[in-house]
Every structure is written in C-alpha cells, then in structure tokens.
C-alpha cells in the first residue's frame, strides 16, 4: 500500500462574482502553437501596478485548481482565493493536455521546455493586460519551470513552493527507493540511461507507469536541469517555502535551493505537506489529505506569501 501511495504521489472571459470578496474571476486564454491554454484570472484592486501572481502548477495532469484524476486538493484555487482576500491578483491555468487546455501535441512529443514556453506565454498575457508588478509562484515541478521562465522574462519576484533543489532523477530515485527497495538497482539503471539521453525498454511492471515510453522524452528533457544551479541565475527577490511534513520533497531540497542564491529567503512551515495542507508525518494519514478538497490551506501559508509580496 505504501509503495502504491508513493508511486501515485510521484505522478502526481466569463465573469463570476464571488461572495467573500469584491474581486472578479474571469476565464482567460492564450494561444500557443500547440493549441489554446485556459486559465482563471482574479483581479484585485484598480491599480495596474498592484501585484499579480502567476501560479505555475506542479507535476502530473494538474488543472488550474490543483486537481487531477489522481487527487483532489483544490490547493491552487484556495491559494488564489486567499491572495484575493488580501488584495492580490492571481492567474492560474490548466496545463497542456489537462482540463480545458486540450492541446495539439502528443504526450511523447511533450518536453519540459514546452512548459517554460507556456509559462512565458502567460507572462506575456499579463504584460499585455497592463500588469507591471508580476510575481511568479511555482509549485513542485512548477518551481523549476518558474525559475527558467523568470530567467527569460522581466518579473518582480519569485516564489518557490515545495520545489526541489536537485535534478528530478535524484528526487525520484529517493522517493521510489524508499518504498521499493528491491527495485533500487533497476531504478538507478533506468535513470542513468535516461540521463544519457537514451530511452529504456525493459522496465519492471511496478515501474512501467513512470517509465512508459511516451513520457521518457519528457523525463530526459527534465533531468538536464538542476534547480540549485538555475535559481542562482536569478537577480530578483526570492522566497522559498517548504512544509515540514512534505512527503514528496525533502527539507534538504529547500536548503539546497536557498544555497544556490544568496538573495533567497527560506521559510519552513511546520506541519504543512506537499499540497499545502495541515498534515502529520505519517505517510498514510498525510496521503489522505490528497483526496479531501474541503481541507483549507495551512494557515501560515498565505501570510508568508503576502508578507514577501508586499
């Protein structure tokens, strides 16, 4: 059961008036060569120079609200609403091939760099709408995507939320080996081959989902980047947030990210897990939070973000 839980974790303009604040949420889209991407923009305040946060989603088939067929968290929806209550605008979006962002690209043709291009498209969208004070917030895999997008675009600040400090092959090797010890030699062999840019063919059934042929090009392109190295390129204010009960990304990764950039501020939130909810360290109890979208965000998260932005 624990092994299954770990594998699951790895893969893991219509106006609508809201009741709890005076802001408006609008459905928005951007055009890319692979099809339209759709998202939700909450505009707070009347000044264009007021901050807006681009929320970049994490790994797996995650939509703008932080949900997928695997888990229902509403984490990004709650994050956007929490920021709006503090007068901060935000834009969150469905990843390509997820939700409304149907796309015109097959999984086997999708590369990590495409996600950086898509984040850039949303940054350009915000710029054309007159936003000048743009903050990029990347969650999990979205942290590295945000770092690379920030290197190519003019933004005010960057927030890494539950991001890794190591290349993804190192992170996944740790995650999988902890629960699948007998498969550790195979896991290392597979990643070593992918690291060399070579596809793998012989894979144990337990690992077939993660190492399926159609996703191997994406993994190969993703492994090329070290978040610790890439974050060092940024010359803007940086906030790194990590939860002490994150069972997917270690606190070590947060410290590694911070070590990559002298300007980075690190905040460790006690009792917050990878999906930004209050959770214990126990694997089974922690995992249960991934399937309860009614749970609120950890109460210390929004204040930490707002303090940094303001």
Image (spheres, rainbow, N blue to C red):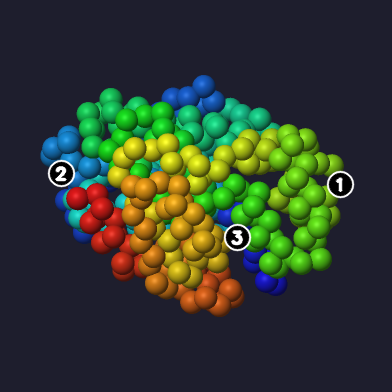
Q: In this view, does 217 lie to the left or right of 74?
A: right
Q: Is residue 102 visible?
A: no
Q: Is residue 191 left or right of residue 235?
A: right
Q: Is residue 88 above or below residue 224?
A: below
| Disc number for residue 202 | 1
Between the residue at mark 3 and the residue at mark 2, the CA separation in whole angstroms equals 37 Å
* Secondary element at image label 2: loop
Residue corresponding to mark 2? 45
* Secondary element at image label 1: loop
User: Which residue is at 69% across, 67% downward?
Assistant: 178
Please say if the residues under marks 2 and 1 sit with CB atoms less than 8 Å apart.
no
Outermost residue toward the top in this view: 33
Outermost residue toward the left in this view: 46
Residue 112: percent from left, percent from top: 57, 36
Q: Is residue 31 visible?
A: yes
Residue corresponding to mark 3? 9
Between the residue at mark 3 and the residue at mark 1, the CA separation in whole angstroms equals 23 Å
Between the residue at mark 2 and the residue at mark 1, the CA separation in whole angstroms equals 55 Å
| Disc number for residue 132 | none
In the rendered structure, which disc, 3 or 1, sits on the residue that comes first in sequence?
3
Comparing marks 2 and 1, which lies closer to the viewer? 1
Count residues near mark 2 (Cα–Cα under 10 Å), then give few for <14, some for 14-19, many for 20+.
some
In the rendered structure, which disc, 3 or 2, sits on the residue that comes first in sequence?
3
User: Which residue is at 20% across, 55% downward?
Assistant: 86
User: Which residue is at 23% across, 32% downward?
Assistant: 132
């Amino acid at each position: 059961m624990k092994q299954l839980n770990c594998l699951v974790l790895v893969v893991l303009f219509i106006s609508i008036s809201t009741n709890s604040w005076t802001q408006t949420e609008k459905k928005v889209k951007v055009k890319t060569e692979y099809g339209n991407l759709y998202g939700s923009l909450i505009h707070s305040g009347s000044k264009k120079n007021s901050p807006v946060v681009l929320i970049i989603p994490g790994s797996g088939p995650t939509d703008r609200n932080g949900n997928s067929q695997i888990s229902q968290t509403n984490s990004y929806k709650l994050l956007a609403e929490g920021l709006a209550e503090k007068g901060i605008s935000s834009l969150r979006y469905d990843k390509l091939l997820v939700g409304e962002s149907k796309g015109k690209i097959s999984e086997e043709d999708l590369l990590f760099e495409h996600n950086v291009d898509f984040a850039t498209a949303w940054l350009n969208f915000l710029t054309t709408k007159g936003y000048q004070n743009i903050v990029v917030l990347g969650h999990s895999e979205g942290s590295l995507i945000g770092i690379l997008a920030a290197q190519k675009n003019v933004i005010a600040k960057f927030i890494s939320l539950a991001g890794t400090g190591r290349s993804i092959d190192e992170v996944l090797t740790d995650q999988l080996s902890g629960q699948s010890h007998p498969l550790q030699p195979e896991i290392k062999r597979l990643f070593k081959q992918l690291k060399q840019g070579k596809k793998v063919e012989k894979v144990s059934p337990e690992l077939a989902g993660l190492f399926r042929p159609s996703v191997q090009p994406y993994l190969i392109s993703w492994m090329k980047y070290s978040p610790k190295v890439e974050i060092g390129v940024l010359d803007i204010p940086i906030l790194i947030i990590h939860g002490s009960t994150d069972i997917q990304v270690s606190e070590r990764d947060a410290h590694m990210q911070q070590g990559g950039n002298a300007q980075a501020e690190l905040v460790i939130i006690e009792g917050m897990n990878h999906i930004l909810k209050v959770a214990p360290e126990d694997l089974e109890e922690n995992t249960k939070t991934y399937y309860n979208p009614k749970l609120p965000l950890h109460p210390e998260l929004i204040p930490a973000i707002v303090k940094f932005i303001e």
